Amino acid sequence: MIQPLPDLLIEATVRAALAEDLGRAGDITAQACIDADAQMSVVFATRQSGVVAGLACARLAILALDPKASFEAVVEDGASVEAGAVLAKVTGNARAILSAERTALNLMGRLSGVATLTRAYVDQTQGTAARIVDTRKTTPGLRHLEKYAVRCGGGVNHRFGLDDAILIKDNHVAACGGVANALKRARAFAGHLTKVELEVDSLEQLAQALPHGADVIMLDNFSPDDLKKAVAMAGDKVVLEASGGVNLQTVRAIAESGVQVISVGALTHSAPVLDIGLDAV
């Protein structure tokens, strides 16, 4: 079971999305066409198969506009569903439900899309030791939700922000004069709980880095053959993370190289929205 995000971490995002949609005068279509006290019942249902994430976003969007509404989740985040599956049942004020509809669908569709794509990558690596992880290539303002959706799909989170861990990339190496100096300075700066990761783009750089105590080495755009050589070179001295050039066609070969981690920016920057609709019943 996926540990759900506390409502406190979601509410501000949901309310900001509602405010963006409601604008200065609220939903004037609902106001014009529907009696203020009218009630209705609806279901959230999928139009295609996938993995569900973001049910709490839909619930909080509805309750923000009608605190007395009934929201019954039929499935849990992380569930695999077929096209046509009912995800949640809602009864409440008709104006409120229809005014919250698009915000609820936008967030749940986006997050379910991330979870669905993540599950596809995880399925491709079954039977290997590699774990699929995300990156910081997220939608501004939605990182906590998109990374939650990755977990719903069976993936693992990389760092959440620049303050989580030290990740020395090629431009950092260039700015401070080489791999050895970068790692030496990082180790001197890091606290005892702070991990240090270094990105390398060749086997030669990997050889330079291994003696200097990185916790993780990111192998950037390595071929599967070079990944296997890197695994042999590193042994059990360091965690190896493959990155760059990862897609659903290449991820299996990358996983079979023996790396422990595969980071995939596409999980959050290129996931298609899962088609979910709201239907009156």
Image (tube, rainbow, N blue to C red):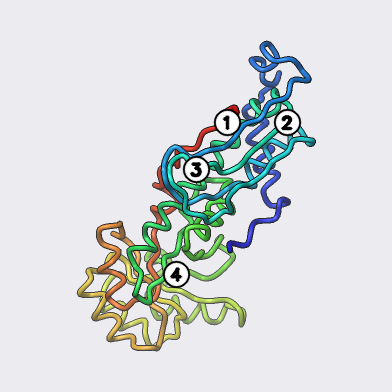
> Sequence-wise, which precedes: disc 3 or disc 2?
3
Marks 4 and 2: CB-CB under 8 Å? no
Query: Comparing marks 4 and 2, which lies closer to the viewer?
Result: 2
Query: Which quadrant of the figure has residue 160?
Result: bottom right
Report how far apart the C-alphas of labels 1 and 4 lie in the structure: 40 Å
- Please say if 165 is above or below 44: below
- From the viewer's perspective, tell me whether residue 278 is left or right of residue 38: left
Marks 3 and 1: CB-CB under 8 Å? no
Query: Which quadrant of the figure has residue 86?
Result: top right
Q: Residues within 10 Å of mark 1 (few under 14, many from 20)?
A: some
- Kind of residue at badge 3: Ala
Between 170 and 78, the one nearer to me in the picture: 78
Quarter of the image where the N terminus is located: bottom right
Residue annotated with mark 1 = 102
Report how far apart the C-alphas of labels 4 and 3 lie in the structure: 45 Å
Please indicate, yes or no, whether residue 137 appears anywhere in the rendered image. yes
> Sequence-wise, which precedes: disc 3 or disc 1?
3
On the image, the x and y values in percent for residue 232 come to 27, 86
Query: Comparing marks 3 and 1, which lies closer to the viewer?
Result: 3
